[in-house]
Image (cartoon, helix red, strand yellow):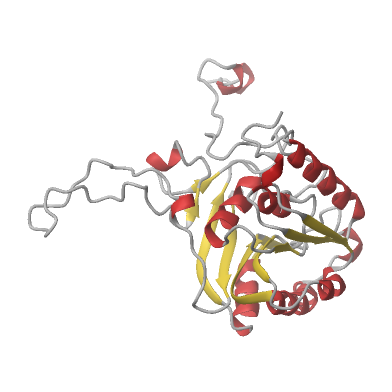
Amino acid sequence: MGEDAPKASAIAPIELLAGDASKVLSKVKAKSVSLVVTSPPYNIGKIYERSQKRTLDQYRIWIEPIARAIVRKLKDGGHLCWQSGNYVEEGSIYPLDFIFFDIFRRQGLVLRNRIIWQFNFGLNASRRFSGRYETLLWFTKGDDYTFNLDPVRVPQRYPGKRYSKDHHKAGLPSGNPRGKNPGDVWIFEPEAAFRTNQLWTFPNVKANHAEKTVHPCQFPLELAERCVLALTNPGDLVLDPFVGTGTTVLAAAKHDRPAVGIDLHEQYLEIARERYEKLRQGVLNERPMGRPIATPDAKQRVAQVPEEWGT
């Protein structure tokens, strides 16, 4: 049974729609969505992109009308959490979040945070430093928006710290007893790592990760959950126009938010349906929120220098 699984009665309904987001978004009612959490294709040659590799200019021309359609679905006060990485051409890096910032700024959205998600594993580079983070752009549609800090607070690093003697609260604890704001660089092991640093870091979905499916670019359930808990209330509608195997809709449904997911590839949607059914049954295999990232013990073989490397 999946750890930390919610009761079936708490699971909200989802709708999964097959097809091109540029067309299928028309089925979503305008100004009905409170939160979009998504990660569009990066145009870097993943298996679902190989039939339509685009230049950077072509990529922007393709994504911009979809972006405009997404904004039309957002309620006033709604949120957009747009995860992106880099486009690579002939060894040169193009940060895609710069492009997306410009697109959504021109649609009237306001950037509230540029969040860094750091992880430990990925493609090992030989002619540059290996990339170990992606960005999550959090926009709002207007200035009157939901922000629930308490569900995502993390433990105070120095809970015993007190105001100095020249402060009007001299001698009293200076921190919030409910915890502190996690900041905009995320390391997702909140009960452990946040005591020593400010990052939101959690493992990307690779190899033996509990949530791994056949999709090559899954993001962790915990990333989507953080957005859902902080930026919506129960009953609010959540949308992912590039839903893949369903991470965003699962995070929403798990916390009593109905959700709509769209994807071009029916095989991924079928996996999303299977994962949702497991969530309803309380048997979804997931990595519990707050679990520290595994680190090898110095005595473990994987942590020891191979003899072949010499001294």
Position of residue 102 relative to residue 258, above or below, is below
Q: How many marks?
A: 0
Quadrant (top left, top right, bottom left, bottom right) of the N terminus: top right
Residue, far left: 166
Q: Is residue 213 left or right of residue 167?
A: right
Where 208 sits versus 251, above or below?
above
Image position of 161 (left or right of 187) = left
Q: State the residue at coordinates (71%, 49%).
A: 250
Q: Nearer the viewer, residue 295 or 172?
A: 172
Determine the residue positioned at 84% across, 43% down: 274
Residue 293 screen position, x and y as percent: 55, 34
Which residue lies at the image location 83% right of the left edge and 74% below the top edge?
A: 22
Front-lying residue, 277 or 301: 277
Q: Which image quadrant is residue 29 in?
A: bottom right
User: Quarter-wise, where is residue 40 in the image?
Assistant: bottom right
Q: Position of residue 95 (x, y in %)?
A: 62, 66
Whether residue 95 appears in this view of the structure is no
Q: Residue 170: x and y, percent?
A: 11, 53
Against 311, residue 55 (above or below) is below
Q: Is residue 241 left or right of residue 17?
A: left
Residue 47, visible in the rendered structure: yes
- The residue located at (12%, 52%) in the rendering is 164
